[in-house]
Amino acid sequence: MFGYFIKRLASLVPVLFVVTLAIFLIIHVMPGDPAATMLGMEATEADIASLNEQLGFDRPLYKQYAGWIASVARGDLGQSIFMHQPVAEAIVEHIPPTLSLAVLAEAIALILAIPFGIIAAYKRGSLADISLMGVSLLGMAIPSFMLGLFLMLLIGVKLQWLPVAGYEPLDAGLWNHLKYLILPAISLGTIQAALITRMTRASMLETLSFNFIKTARAKGLRESRVLLKHAFRNAFLPILTVIGQSFGSLMTGAVVVESIFNIPGLGQLILNSIVRRDFMVIQGVVLAVTLVYVGINLLIDLLYGAVDPRVRLDRK
């Protein structure tokens, strides 16, 4: 296991190199002067020259990239021009709302998707199967921001059951924290639930056709035991992969939903940074989100051996 872990970490080095290079080039190779873009049209030549010197934009690109990578290795992601604070500090402040929203959305998706996928596979070709697949297809087709606006109008404005926007930290109490996240979590979790439902159904259908399932039924085991212990456990590896990818998507793709519901997470941070042209924050947030996504994929790979002992991670 340890050898596999080291190999996986080593394999991430070229991925991170390509990602950091792409992030750097997207910011610095765009037409125009980055400092002039950040300061706006009213900036003087002296202001632009001073900011270029302060940020090191007057140096060759390869030196800028090497200096940025060296700073990142020390944990220094730069300084925000508009927020007047280190980028790493701003990211740490904005991660908790995004993490809470992603965890709640993933929980909603799993609560809906796993039972629906198992039922659809067990009732293959029936009205229940057709209905669940139709609903899942509809869930994948509706954009999260559109569903969010509909929920705001129906539940927040018409019924007034939940607040339509805002955020309260966990320190304010669990319910005060969750009531602001339920509507955006449903908006984000619906699409993921539809995807996981379809994967669960497909994986379960394949597993239910194996001979060991027929043997288990021939032994007289209860159908619930056959489905959950024998079929679902053996079908879980592809589902686990989709769950990991969906959680990474929730962490990285909540920009619009966070803006609609006014949640001060990473999505709102990067959107505000784009509007302000705060390039240092954009670089830092994109890099942090990439590291989170890569870390989640690495964790999923390591969980394969725990979920299914037949998977030998250290085997070539």
Image (spheres, rainbow, N blue to C red):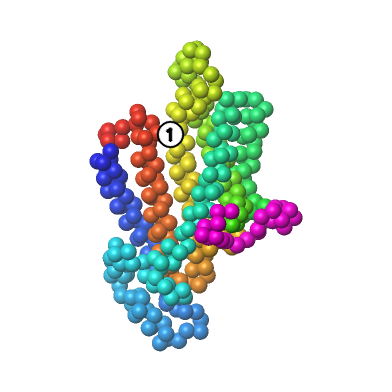
Q: In which quarter of the image is residue 307?
A: top left
Where in the figure is residue 268, as x and y percent of width and height? 53, 63
Where in the figure is residue 12, as x and y percent of width and height? 32, 50
Residue in the picture at 48% in, 54% down? 99
Q: Name the residue under label 1.
A: 237
Residue 27 inside the magenta-drawn segment: no
Residue 160 inside the magenta-drawn segment: yes
Residue in the picture at 47% in, 40% down? 242
In which quadrant of the rendered image does the N terminus lie? Answer: top left
Residue in the picture at 54% in, 49% down? 104
4 over 181 or under it: above or below: above
Q: Quadrant of residue 281?
A: bottom left
Who is closer to the viewer here, 27 or 110? 110
Where in the figure is residue 192, as x and y percent of width and height? 55, 44
The residue stretch that appears in magenta: 154-175
- In the rendered picture of this protein, how many numbered marks are placed on residues? 1
Residue in the picture at 44% in, 67% down? 90
232 over 177 or under it: above or below: above
Where in the figure is residue 258, as x and y percent of width and height? 56, 59
Name the amino acid, label 1.
Leu
* CA neighbours of label 1 inside 10 A, class few (<14), some (14 to 19), many (20+): many
In which quadrant of the rendered image does the C terminus lie? Answer: top left
Q: Quadrant of residue 50?
A: bottom left
Residue 25 appears in the rendering: no
118 over 41 or under it: above or below: above
Residue 229 appears in the rendering: yes
Label 1: element kind: helix
Residue at the right extreme, as displayed: 158
Position of residue 68 in the picture relative to residue 41 (left or right) = left
Who is closer to the viewer here, 164 or 300? 164
